Image (spheres, grey):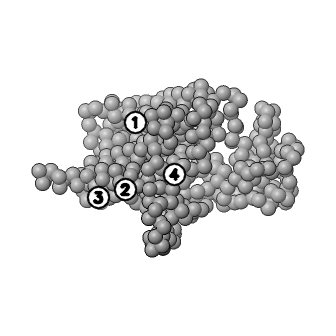
């Protein structure tokens, strides 16, 4: 009995940490974005400015238990189950303890209580990736198709709740294709591509079913307006379509005053916003055409603006704008923070970790792991999931360069999770190759 318990210490630790996380963080901290999604869930009227699928799921969870508690529980189940699977994969290695503390690593733990689409996306993809990794390493046939069906369900949800996920989906569906025969052959590639297309079509159809035409926000316009604002400021000349300038609140001088290199929010998400997108299909077409013309005429300024925004992702940290002590006041830890000594301890820890938690320190590891997985792909079974993890992370970073209208550590959270999930696989791939 003692030996049995000793072998399962990491899993017991994970279980206790899971229970403690639920108690401490219940019912979670609702982000401003999630507050809007919850309102949509309660009303049953969905928009596409935020993922309607998350609101749809939340609506029915809310009927079981009102509030954000069950969404928090769902996120924690996905995170801790993924960690448990990784523990089992490395049960004969000391790395099992690394995965036992994975949910408690500061730059993962810091987002645990936050109810936001990025967390739901990251944890659903992390769990799907962990299941695929277990299948790839063990090459088991038992319950394989049940597990792959679970993976497909997780991928549908994760892709539906985060726009950029649709560009990452292919690497995980290729993983599903690989697991059918445990070979990287033509059949696996075709299966992966077809499954990716089917999931995307299912997502688009479901979103269309949920969101009526009157509730479509066409939020892609905000990225284009942001790019035009940056180029206009660099040229010191307003480069916007005429309908944008006809907005009563439009003012080029205000745009220059309110512009932020980190986000579009001060220009569009404030009362009396100076920039607004088109209300008609003709205006939206005009905006897209004007954006293309302006970017092609000023490619250097466009790339400079995108690079400046993109690099903020690498140097941002969780709670960059809100002190963690204030963050935790909204959880069951709130009463403890009235103690000045505890508040001071959190303050010192936050300031100490604020540099260490930047994603820039993980970027060299990600690049090295990508190289390691490629050169060992046909030699080492641990290189297969490592390549899958790395491709998802690298592709997201590339997508964010062109398709983001803000920068924050939250946007690269899935990359943070996958890099930390990669350490054991990278070590095994490197050691066995050596």
The residue lying at 37 percent from left, 56 percent from top is: 102
- Marker disc for residue 29: 4
Q: Is residue 160 above or below residue 359?
A: above
The residue lying at 32 percent from left, 37 percent from top is: 182
Q: Which tag, 2 or 1, sits closer to the chain's start?
A: 2
Give the class, few, some or many, for how many residues have Cα within 10 Å of label 4's Cα (few <14, many ≥20). Answer: many
The residue lying at 35 percent from left, 45 percent from top is: 81
Give the foreground label among 4 and 1: 4
Give the foreground label among 4 and 2: 4
Give the class, few, some or many, for how many residues have Cα within 10 Å of label 3's Cα (few <14, many ≥20). Answer: some
Real-space Cα separation, disc 3 to disc 2, in angstroms = 9 Å
Q: Which tag, 3 or 2, sits closer to the chain's start?
A: 3
Query: Which residue was labeled with disc 1?
Result: 151
Give the class, few, some or many, for how many residues have Cα within 10 Å of label 2's Cα (few <14, many ≥20). Answer: many
Query: Which residue was labeled with disc 3?
Result: 97
Query: Which residue was labeled with disc 2?
Result: 102
The residue lying at 31 percent from left, 48 percent from top is: 84
Give the foreground label among 4 and 3: 4
Q: Is residue 31 above or below residue 50?
A: below
Q: Judge from the rendering whether residue 388 lies leftward or rightward of residue 244; answer left or right.
A: left
Q: Judge from the rendering whether residue 381 lies leftward or rightward of residue 22; answer left or right.
A: left
Q: Judge from the rendering whether residue 250 lies leftward or rightward of residue 173; answer left or right.
A: right
Q: Which tag, 4 or 2, sits closer to the chain's start?
A: 4
x and y percentages locating residue 54 in the rendered image: 53, 38
Where's the C terminus, which quadrant? bottom left
Indicate the secondary structure of the residue bearing disc 1: helix
């Amino acid at each position: 009995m003692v030996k049995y318990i000793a072998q399962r210490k990491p899993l017991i630790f994970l279980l206790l940490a899971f229970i403690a996380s639920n108690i401490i963080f219940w019912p979670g901290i609702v982000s401003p974005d999630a507050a809007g999604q919850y309102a949509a869930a309660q009303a049953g009227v969905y928009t596409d400015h935020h993922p309607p699928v998350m609101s749809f799921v939340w609506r029915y969870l809310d009927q079981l238990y009102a509030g954000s508690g069950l969404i928090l529980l769902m996120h924690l189940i996905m995170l801790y189950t993924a960690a448990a699977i990784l523990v089992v994969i490395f049960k004969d290695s000391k790395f099992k303890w690394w995965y036992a503390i994975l949910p408690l690593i500061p730059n993962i733990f810091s987002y645990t209580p936050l109810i936001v689409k990025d967390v739901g996306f990251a944890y659903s993809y992390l769990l799907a990736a962990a299941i695929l990794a277990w299948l790839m390493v063990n090459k088991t046939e038992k319950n394989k198709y049940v597990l792959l069906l679970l993976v497909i369900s997780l991928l549908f949800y994760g892709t539906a709740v985060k726009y950029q996920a649709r560009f990452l989906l292919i690497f995980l569906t290729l993983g599903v294709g690989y697991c059918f025969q445990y070979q990287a052959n033509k059949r696996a590639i075709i299966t992966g591509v077809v499954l990716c297309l089917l999931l995307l079509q299912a997502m688009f159809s479901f979103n269309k079913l949920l969101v009526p035409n009157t509730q479509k926000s066409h939020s892609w316009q905000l990225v284009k307006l942001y790019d035009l604002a940056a180029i206009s400021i660099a040229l010191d000349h307003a480069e916007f379509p005429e309908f944008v300038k006809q907005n009563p609140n439009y003012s080029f001088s205000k745009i220059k005053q309110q512009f932020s290199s980190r986000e579009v929010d001060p220009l569009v998400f404030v009362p009396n916003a100076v920039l607004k997108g088109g209300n008609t299909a003709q205006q939206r077409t005009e905006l897209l055409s004007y954006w293309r013309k302006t970017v092609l005429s000023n490619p250097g300024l466009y790339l400079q603006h995108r690079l400046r925004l993109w690099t903020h992702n690498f140097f941002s940290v969780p709670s960059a704008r809100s002190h963690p002590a204030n963050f935790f006041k909204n959880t069951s830890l709130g009463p403890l923070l009235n103690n000045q000594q505890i508040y001071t301890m959190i303050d010192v820890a936050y300031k100490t970790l604020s540099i260490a938690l930047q994603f820039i320190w993980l970027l060299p590891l990600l690049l090295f792991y990508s190289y390691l997985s490629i050169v060992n792909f046909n030699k080492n079974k641990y290189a297969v999931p490592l390549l899958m993890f790395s491709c998802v992370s690298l592709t997201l970073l590339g997508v964010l360069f062109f398709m983001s209208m803000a920068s924050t550590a939250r946007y690269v959270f899935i990359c943070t999770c996958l890099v930390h999930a990669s350490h054991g696989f990278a070590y095994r791939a490197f050691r066995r190759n050596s």
